[in-house]
Image: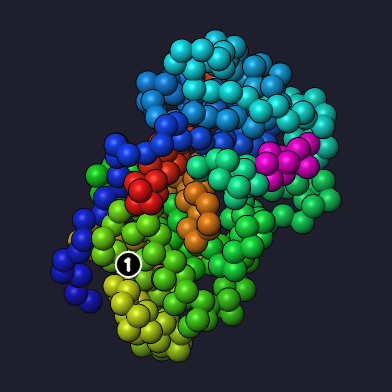
Amino acid sequence: MNAPATSSSATPAPRGPQSVPQPLRIAITTGEPAGVGPELTAMALAGAAAHWPDAEFVVLGDADLLAARAAAVNVDWAALCTIGAGSRVRVEHVPLAAPAQAGKLDAANGRYVLALLDRAIDGAMARTFDAIVTAPLQKSTINDAGVPFTGHTEYLAERTHTPRVVMMLAGTGARPLRVALATTHLPLKDVPAALTIDSLVETLRIIDHDLRRHFGVPQPRILVTGLNPHAGENGYLGREEIDTISPALKAAVAAGIDARGPYPADTLFQPRYLNEADCVLAMFHDQGLPVLKYATFGEGINVTLGLPIIRTSVDHGTALDLAGTGRADAGSLIAAVDAAVSMARFRHTRAS
């Protein structure tokens, strides 16, 4: 298999346009109250005025919980949220359903977590918020509260009435590694049936469109994995590459999308391919994300493509064992906030 030859530059979301309305308004959901989300929010926003002078942040969560978790990580939350010169942070109080203890899940707060997310989505859809950033939540708590819940990605699609969204994780830097998923939170046995020509073409269209719209990549190059070992070995190890993935790539190319493959996933993730790509499309969750998280964990972000709103998130979970200890790292949430601000800036610049 020959390596791709040339590609457009894989740039991060552009920074610093001059015509953006002031300030951008970014909502942050603080996620599972027993997890690290509340304290990471405080840590990330401690330098908000200096890092993002053109943005203000609306933190969604229980005000008392946020103050207590901020104190645990030595952030002066009252001073940070005081209205005045240089203040860029305010709390929109959403009360807990039950007292929250760091590290201990309580199903009584499952609907509280969803209330935070609903408020952020509604505000973004109404253009009250320019973007939303979501701290990690605990799926089991929401399900234990009696609400069927698969994940942020699927819930955002349902609440925004978006027929198809794409989950993409990305590293940071001048040439970020980006990995998008053709399927998300499915049992492995259900993945082959979920892959269709039409769904793959639509997924590639969304990736191509949003890399242009949100990240300023002028001509995205997308490398696509196969599903089976060795990309099916010409049908000897499975026919999905022949019957589904290759026809989808042919249709995408005919539509003007620079999509190439299918490549064996075990050899695709190396510099001679990735240096010439803007995104990799993997067929299932644990095919692409272990590689990306190995390379970028703690500094990567999760972006939901295809939505009518901007949404970014962290690349990790609730870290219940670290909650309240002061040992959690806010790097991924800082990167998610930075990406949300940059994407919002770029959208306003394009619209102006």
In the displayed structure, 91 sits above or below 308; it is: above
Q: Residue at x 32, y 67 (%)?
A: 222
**Spot occupied by residue 214 in the image (x, y as percentages of width and height):** 38, 53
In the displayed structure, 80 sits above or below 204; it is: above
Magenta segment:
109-119
**Spot occupied by residue 156 in the image (x, y as percentages of width and height):** 62, 54
Left or right of residue 260, residue 35 in this image: right
Main SS of the magenta segment? helix
**Between 334 and 206, which is closer to the camera in this rendering?**
206
Left or right of residue 22, residue 161 in this image: right
Residue topped by disc 1: 222
Q: Magenta stretch: residue 295 in it?
A: no
Left or right of residue 83, residue 55 in this image: left
Q: Residue at x 41, y 71 (%)?
A: 204
Q: Amino acid at mark 1?
A: Ile
**Between 89 and 232, which is closer to the camera in this rendering?**
89
Quadrant location of residue 128? top right
Quadrant location of residue 254? bottom left
**Spot occupied by residue 276 in the image (x, y as percentages of width and height):** 21, 61
Q: Is residue 275 visible?
A: yes
Local packing at callout 1 (Cα closer than 10 Å; few below 14, some 14-19, many 20+) is many
Left or right of residue 72, residue 12 in this image: left
In the displayed structure, 219 sits above or below 10; it is: below
**Spot occupied by residue 273 in the image (x, y as percentages of width and height):** 24, 63
Label 1 residue SS? strand
Q: Residue at x 67, y 41 (%)?
A: 119
